[in-house]
Image (cartoon, grey):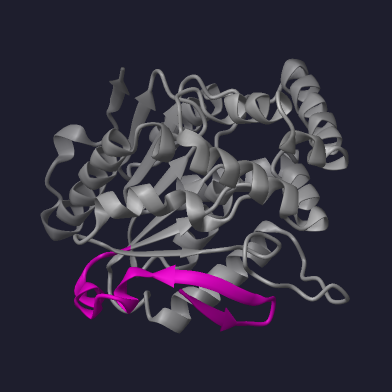
Amino acid sequence: MSYFSNDRCNMFYTDTAENDPALKNKPVVLFVNGWAISSRYWKPLIEKLTPDYRCVTYDQSGTGKTAIETNHKPSFTIQGFADEAAALIEHLGLNNGRKLHIIGHSMGGMVATELSLRFSDSLLSSTILACGIFEENALTSVGLMFLGGLIDFSMNLRNIFQVEPLKSLFIKRAATAEIGREYSNIIVEDFVTSDKDATNAVGHFSIDREVLRTYTKHVIEIASPVLCCVGMKDHTIPPEGTVTLFHTRKQKTASPTRLVQFMNLGHLPMLEDTKRFAEQLKKHFEFANDFYKNNSHEDIANDVFQIV
């Protein structure tokens, strides 16, 4: 566990190679967190990926242990969050050679997409988890408006989620399957203690039409293999959006794209079914490695996998 000072913040991060220098020669997995949550929720997944991969997590500006100055807050945009992550990638030398897997969860999928383009020469694969797009119509507009109001309500009254039964209801919106008391407490604690300006800004730019159009364009432009992954009982973000993202990319690029649907999981597959989620990630990583070695495994590119 370390800190790295950059132009935006004093960033807290973890790097499994700190305790095991042999991991510096392994492929790297960089985890980009979702909205209003610290990097602690990746721990069970990292335990499944070690020792085959070097795993790096970090707390974005305004979350967890990453400090920002009260009188000089950075810009809370996809570009801004990508800037600080890019600084960490360069600081740790993760861009030296093609060895980088980037995973983005929820809002982090947008940041991960931006990073995937910036570090295209270093990228082995991208994984976009629960961060989809939607057809633009009147119904979508109403839905986004409702979601914006829900974000405002949640931020103004977020302390109430520390008290039962609202705490349990909050967790049930995030996770369909049981995630245990430790991580239930972490999810609520991170949301309640996150920087209000950062959390509010992220919540709103994540549903902005122009931001979503740019995000769609950028996902299509990723040349490396992309895994779209979603829990089909997600009550936080409609899972159909990730399915739509997969089909849009599949139609508009020849680059490999795969879709994994966990039919009985919610917004937090990495906690709800860590073992099977890790298995799917490893398959994706292996496919990406083979793709760059000899373009093999073409038989599973652009496929859909439903996991019950």
Please state the total of marks drawn on the protein image.
Answer: 0
As drawn, 75 above or below 266: below
In the rendered structure, the answer to whether residue 274 lies left or right of residue 298 reads right
Residue 129 locus on image (x, y percent): 46, 40
Residue 215 locus on image (x, y percent): 59, 46
Residue at figure coordinates x 50%, y 31% from the top left: 242
Residue 18 in magenta? yes
Residue at figure coordinates x 34%, y 78% from the top left: 18
As drawn, 43 above or below 92: above
In the rendered structure, the answer to whether residue 205 lies left or right of residue 278 reads right
User: Could you say which is closer to the camera, residue 269 or residue 163?
Assistant: 163
User: Could you say which is closer to the camera, residue 120 or residue 238?
Assistant: 238
**Residue 226, image quadrant:** top left
Residue 289 locus on image (x, y percent): 19, 56
As drawn, 218 above or below 238: below
Magenta extent: 1-28
**Residue 237, image quadrant:** top right
Is residue 36 at all visible to an observer of this figure? no
Residue 108 in magenta? no
Is residue 213 at all visible to an observer of this figure? yes
**Residue 207, image quadrant:** top right
